[in-house]
Image: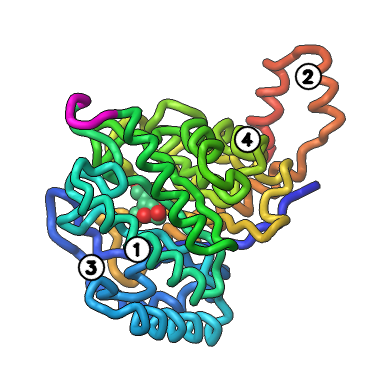
Amino acid sequence: MPGTFRFSFGPWNIHEGADPFGPPVRPTVAFAEKLKLYKKMGFDGVQFHDDDAVPQLNHMSPAQVEKAAREMAKLLDGEGLVAEFVAPRLWEDPRTIDGGYTSNNPAERQYAIDRSLQTVDIARALNCDKVVLWLAREGTYIREAKDATKAVELLVTAINKMLAHDSAIKILIEPKPNEPMDLAYIPTIGHAIGLSYVTSDPGRVGALVESAHAILAGLDPSDEMAYALAHKKLWSVHLNDQNGLKFDQDKAFGAVDLRRAFMQVWVLDRNGFGNNGEFVGLDVKAMRTQKAEVAALHLSNSREIFLSLLEVVRGLDQSRIDELIAQRNYEQLEMEIIRALLGK
Ligand code: 3MF
Ligand code: MG
């Protein structure tokens, strides 16, 4: 069954252009202004960090957090948008310097868990049943610093607390092999899915595949997606692109390797992605050189590239593909795929 595609992005995808070596180069766009761009560019879903939805949440009472989240839900409603997921931002607070859930300090671990439970509450107030865990600092700079077996147990403990806190919440693990850590504990989708099976409710723990994160692990994003789909655990994606094993570039989807992007669309469409309400999420950054008035093009371009590739996927002659596979004539199959991509 073919897929159904609705698109989402997070407010951090429209940004000021700062990088580790230079300051912002574009003015900040207010959240309300960003929201207006969604529908205009063909997007229906908003991805949130907890503090995108409720700024300053560390300084608010639970009642104040809930009230602010409900106001955000109304704002979304007014724009005809829905919240796709909420992710606890566990990588900025001084208490998460050595990781959140896997910190060696029990008080810091408790902070990470408490903050994650608050994220679950915010998701509920936004009428959203998905929490994404990008396990940013859950890893080490040197292997001797932490016990890697205990780290897995600590991750399971934290996830189980979130599952117990809300019987409807689903947890999506977004693996990434490195950056900011030298070595992360959950680097690939296989690790994420393995982790799901040792939690208290594996049916509510799934995954989000980000194209660039798979590439950074030396893997093919479409195979990572297919692996999660086979486990019925691909509940979101972060499409983007990446030039080899460098820093996480978050380039527009398909901008580096169109064929690799094509294969991701192929896998998603042929497996009916989106038919249970999953979003095609983007996680892309505008180039630092981009001027403010055109600094959202990377989003509309990524969506357009996805939809153009979808046309290519759907325009292929399956009986011809089957014939070439039966003949084991993969050279010819490759040529015909390339021709389709070239519009010939
Ligand atoms: C980092 C990421 C993150 C996550 C986001 C949601 C800032 O490489 O991909 O983007 O996607 O935090 O969990
Ligand atoms: Mg991401």
Amino acid type at circle 1 is: Trp
Q: Secondary structure at mark 2?
A: helix
In the foreground, 226 or 28: 226
Amino acid type at circle 2 is: Ile
| Nearer-N-terminus badge (4/3) | 3
In the foreground, 259 or 49: 49
Q: Secondary structure at mark 3?
A: loop
Label annotation for residue 12: 1
Other residues around mark 3 within 10 Å, as few (<14) / some (14–19) / many (≥20): some
Other residues around mark 1 within 10 Å, as few (<14) / some (14–19) / many (≥20): some
- Looking at the rendering, the stretch of residues picked out in magenta corresponds to 143-147
67 left or right of 237? left
| Residue picked out by circle 4 | 226
| Nearer-N-terminus badge (2/1) | 1
Please tell me whether mark 4 or mark 3 is closer to you in this view: 4
Q: Secondary structure at mark 1?
A: helix
From the viewer's perspective, is residue 261 above or below residue 331?
below
Q: Secondary structure at mark 4?
A: helix
| Nearer-N-terminus badge (2/4) | 4
Query: Disc 1, disc 3: CB below 8 Å?
Result: no
Query: Disc 2, disc 1: CB below 8 Å?
Result: no
Q: Which residue is painted at 37% across and 67% down in the image?
A: 50
Amino acid type at circle 3 is: Arg
| Nearer-N-terminus badge (1/3) | 1
| Nearer-N-terminus badge (4/1) | 1
Measure how far apart labels 4 and 3 are at the Cα level. Answer: 38 Å
Measure how far apart labels 2 and 1 are at the Cα level. Answer: 43 Å
From the viewer's perspective, is residue 157 above or below residue 323?
below
Amino acid type at circle 4 is: Ala
| Residue picked out by circle 2 | 325
Q: Is residue 145 magenta?
A: yes
Label annotation for residue 26: 3
